[in-house]
Image (cartoon, rainbow, N blue to C red):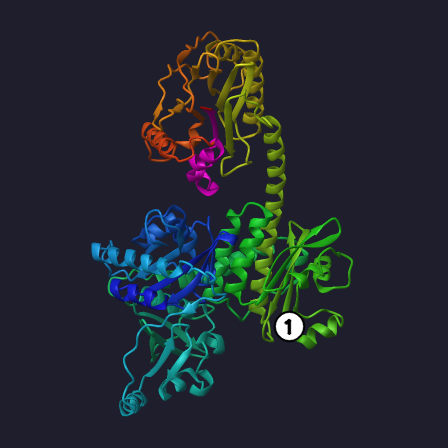
Amino acid sequence: MDAVLADVMRDTGASIGLLYLLVPQERSLRLALISGVSPEIAAPWVRVPADAPVPVADAVRDRRFVWLGSRQEIAHRYPRLGIVLPYEFMLAAAPVTDGDTGPVHGGIVLLWPVWHPPRLDDRERAMLDDCCRRAARLLVPVAGQPPPSVPAEPRAVHAARPSETDPALGAAAVEFAERLPEGCCALDLDGRVTFLNSAGARLVDAGAAFLLGRRLWEVLLWLDDPAFEDCYREAVITRRPTSVTVVRRPSTRLRFDLHPDPTGVSVQITEVAGPPPAGPYATTAAATAPGADAPGAAAASVTAAAAAAVVGAAGATGDRARAVPEPVAEPVGAGAVYRLMHLAASLAEAAGVREVVELVADQIVPAFGPRGLVMMSADQGRLRIVGHRGYRQDFVERFDNTPLTADVADAQVLATGVPLFFTDVDDLLRAHPHAPRYEGRNAWAFLPLIASGRPVGSLILSYEQPRPFPPAERALLTSLAGLIAQAVARARLYDAKQSLAHSLQTGLLPHSLNPPPGVNVAARYLPAGHGMDVGGDFYDLVRATPTTAIAVIGDVQGHNTAAAALMGQVRTAVHAHATAGASPGDILARTNRLLTDLDPDRFTSCLIAELDLAQGRLRLATAGHPPPLLRGPGGGARVLDVEPGLVLGIAPDVTYRTTEMPWEPGSVLALYTDGLVEAPGTDLGTAMTDLAGRLARSRFGDDPDRLADELIRHVEDATHRTDDVALLLVHRAS
């Protein structure tokens, strides 16, 4: 698999490559291979939910190629991605599959610098398609062997390097670098120092042996500034030279020029004459590529302000949460700020508590450094575990249902509102001698989740190594807890509304359908993907006589409780008139008069189909509803021509004409609402014809349940569903 990713990057000229594998039981994508970029930069996307608004998820879910040709297009279509990577690059995402009908095993993402042409050419598209097919074939399980496993951590695929250099040439290169009056330094793609000449060590005032294997901005306090880290990130992502000028206190101005390639970054360090720049960090940043509009400079200039804004917003969750001191001398790193902003944007879109928990676990563990996470919710005086990552199930279950009055750290932080940080095992045991310890964990952060002054839960993070938790990190984690607390509070309200909506919807739709002998039926209802999960689409099947039944489908305007209430009134009226023996046209006319008397300030479309088994006839009437489909016994399907009538609730004196036609044994009548066929940019007539084609091609003409599942499959994803969907299939047995 490594060779597949390396080959497609070489053949297409891509600078960065990511290969994801689908984990069906989790409904998510896991990052398996990474090339050309630091895993830390890719951390927000190590695990991607299948319905996330991310290019690779769209490519896999919709089995389509995704192309983003500019930073503006990325910001418009995928704002979360644009927040974390506000740089110039191009991106392609494609599903890993062996053909149009084969299973999808995952997805691949490739990035190019902006000097690439605005579109992939035919050769590059062919190379990418071939890569997806090769990867798919490697992922097909071999008979008698377990399926390929998904790695717990993404594996790095390194760019091909030249063959081993002559030691004499290597020594000459080192001597050359040592003779230079300027400093020079080499960083790997993770930003860690791999070489530093003597002039560079003198300029940064630190020994090469101390810096090797470390990130400059993490060990040099005067360089712990968002601008430098952002400059490095921009160089790696865009593959363009960048530069930043920083003051080494008290007054030495140093310019860092970064020159990236697929294996790392070469850094030139020079002392700059002149007065030091003003400002709390004394930093300037500018992209040096010809014609560049300096995205890194803009990003670097706002990271400190963004950090302060996010920290301030999260810190406003309650008076007690503000007891933690704000950092003074330690700015938050650019990477941490971008990850915090990405998490904030993601949490703003999260709906229920379960979605918040999954999102927090997916984002925090890979992006912020902990090895384990436990999230607890305050409920009726107890802490209940709502999610965890990095722990065995049997370990965390012991702490479920902890009383809020217990003398344990997770309850203590919720009572006081002040987070607790334990830098090592001894620190934890001094405060809580009987605290349990999970193997391999040596530092802990216990964070209260407080929203609007009310406790909602606690968050526990554990780390593999002892950790000092400097003030900047403590402030960042406290901000993180504030954002999560607000999201949990919103999610609880959403879940309560969802529960109410579900109860209302369940009460208004029929609990079961009772067809006459010789008729099989199947019904499906999908709510709109946003809002209160309740709407006005409805269906019913009414037994009129022993040999006749009335099939009903309708759509009340709106997606709220008012629409649902009117839907209940319409359904009751239709049911009453149908059992009284009225024709389809008369049922609609009488129901319309009732609605105009009620003056509901909204209209309703409705379709009535009378199923006459004794005479083998269909009688239909419509009030502005999409026409039904009929699949014949031989498999062909067509859109039925039913004379349209005015929607219900507009004018009182309206007549509706009944259309009659044969109903042969073995045929299937399909009634549906517009949510099944309407889509932005799609002609309604074309969509109905396409639906008729899928009805005709289905292998399940004699099985309404499986046929219904097949017909609604393309709208099952709630993320992109903006309208209710109702479907009623009526099959006359042969």
Q: Is residue 670 above or below residue 275?
A: above
Q: Quadrant of residue 449?
A: bottom right
Compare residues 672 and 551 and report the one nearer the observer: 551
Report the magenta residues as a range.
704-732
Where is mark 1, residue-wise?
439
Report the label total: 1
Measured as percent of width and height from the top left, residue 108 is found at 36, 58
Image check: 310 left or right of 260? Answer: right
The residue shown at (46%, 42%) is 717
The residue shown at (78%, 58%) is 405
Q: Residue 724 lies in magenta, yes or no?
A: yes
Identify the image quadrant of the C terminus.
top left
Q: Residues within 10 Å of mark 1 (few under 14, many from 20)?
A: few
Query: Please, what is the three-letter code of the amino acid marked with disc 1?
Result: Glu
Q: Residue 670 lies in magenta, yes or no?
A: no
Measured as percent of width and height from the top left, residue 511 is found at 60, 28
